Image (cartoon, grey):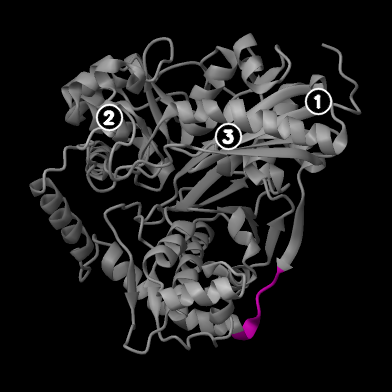
Amino acid sequence: MTVNPDRALVVGVDYGTLSGRAVVVRVSDGAELGSGVHAYPHAVMDHTLTAGPASETSSPVRLAPDWALQVPQDYVDVLKVAVPAALEAARRDHGIDPSDVIGIGTDFTACTMVPTTEDGTPLNELPEFADRPHAYVKLWKHHAAQGHADRINTLAHARGEEWITRYGGLISSEWEFAKGLQVLEEDPEVYRAIDHWVEAADWIVWRLSGTYVRNACTAGYKGIYQDGHYPSSEFLAALNPEFADFVSTKVEHEIGALGSAAGRLTAEAAAWTGLPEGIAVAVGNVDAHVTAPAANAVEPGQMTAIMGTSTCHVMNGPELHEVPGMCGAVDGGIVDQLWGYEAGQSGVGDIFGWFVDTCVPPSYVDAAAARGLSVHEYLTELAAQQAIGEHGLVALDWHSGNRSVLVDHELSGLVVGQTLATKPEDTYRALLEATAFGTRTIVESFVASGVPVTELVVAGGLLKNALLMQIYADVTRLPLSTIASDQGPALGSAIHAAVAAGAYPDVRAAARVMGKRTAAAYTPIEENSVRYDALFAEYTLLHDYFGRLDRPGSNGVMHRLKAIRRDARAGAGVQA
């Protein structure tokens, strides 16, 4: 295939929590020429199974607390809808020719797992498993495997497993092995039917290219793959004898380097997307990790926070350090020749959304509508009028558990200081601040462990909230830069597609040309930072009291409440 280098294009597809977005990008300068989006029809199944035969009856399968499932066909539909829409927008607005596209790259939320047959068919598409929750995709925020993660952690420390230190001493309920162990012990029949336990990031590449290649990013961060090895069969057997061959029979597969080509676009996928058959399909990747190149923020000291429903913090370092509570340190996990570090917060935008959806009175909704504002915008406007600390509140941002630095999804949200005079904007601002305090906790853990953080780079939809951005700069005392793209992950995937197609020698070189950010868009205001230091001290007291259960004087009430809730749900007849 011959393409004029000045006209060469790539497509990036970002698979988020609720939708997939595609963007057409010019290789020569990173210009975004057209985009398309497709919302998943089944969204997130976290209360009932809205797919399968039972969903059409009066008694759909109910899900237990902390479940989060998806339907893999929704991901394929993104290729059929969002990619053609992006191509059409680019043709209409810029006169592009789809024949100039030389590659496609994708990214996904992680850890999002698809149980499949040998040929990649998801188990939920088999009639015998259509009403079995464990046959469906387990989304990243499926936290129902916390007990299984706890057992993995306890055993790893008892056996002195070296790999556990690469993950800050704890692996998460969100990851491959905890979720896999849950399937085995809760639905052995589904477990036995699994031929491949596939990251969704790799499953969609399999659909595009016809080739199954594990990507180095999720293998290292979510699949406990370190120094060329997974946990041993002896370790797995100690968890459960039937789990001994989990790696050899369901996980182990060829691993592809980031930015390399997994294969070529098949005729079937070309028909779905409107792209040329045979173009390069980049090895899969994670939404957070591809975003750092999109912001041209891949050098040591630059921490990129991708802020959406959750926040993922990624950064590079020249050497390996063990950071308590991090999600992983992987050699080449973001770019070659540097150690890639990851941490995160399980709930950020989700927390703000929950508050707006469930805790705001109709009078506020009406007032926002009268002003032509969303409720978020209206609450932000009111909150911005407050002096720091005026609301008298401090909150813990654990409504979806704690990913870093405690790695405990049995924890839950908390707001302290509410009175009968507390207004919605007070609590809303306290929640904004709580997520900033959570990020500062992560930053301080990195710095204390020998991984300096000199710049905070923000990507994702929440960067549009100027109050939130200034709070983050003030709380962390870091210059805060913002990505110059509204489609950071999709642009990052496009950058990897350009490298896979041979347009650039490596991701760092492509990022320098195609990635962009506004440096120091927000800077800390010393007076504000001093006030936030006082609130952060209170946050830290609560953080340690409720979260650090290994310390004397801590309180495990959040764990006990989760157990009480599960017992009550089981008594009410929840089937999964």
Q: Quadrant of residue 134?
A: top left
Task: Pick whichever of labels 1 and 3 is earlier in the sequence.
Answer: 3
Q: Could you give the CA–CA distance between mark 3 and mark 2, rounded to whole angstroms?
A: 23 Å
Q: Position of residue 266 (x, y in %)?
A: 63, 11
Q: Quadrant of residue 157?
A: top left
Q: Residues within 10 Å of mark 3 (few under 14, many from 20)?
A: many
Q: In terms of depth relative to the viewer, which is nearer, 235 or 123?
A: 123
Q: Is residue 201 visible?
A: no
Of labels 3 and 2, the one closer to you? 2
On residue 107, which mark appears? 3
Does 233 sit left or right of 560 as displayed? right
- In the rendered view, would you say 557 is above or below 514? below
Q: Could you give the CA–CA distance between mark 1 and mark 3, rounded to whole angstroms?
A: 19 Å
Identify residue for label 1: 503
Q: Secondary structure at mark 2?
A: helix
**Residue appearing at x 53%, y 33% in the figure:** 217
Q: Residues within 10 Å of mark 2 (few under 14, many from 20)?
A: many
Q: Amino acid at mark 2?
A: His
Q: Secondary structure at mark 1?
A: loop
Identify residue for label 2: 134
The quadrant in which the N terminus is found is top right
Q: Amino acid at mark 1?
A: Ala
Q: Could you give the CA–CA distance between mark 1 and mark 2, rounded to whole angstroms?
A: 41 Å
Does 108 sit left or right of 270 as displayed? left
Magenta-drawn segment: 522-527
Q: In terms of depth relative to the viewer, which is nearer, 487 or 443?
A: 487
**Residue appearing at x 40%, y 56% in the figure:** 405
Does 78 sit left or right of 46 as displayed? right
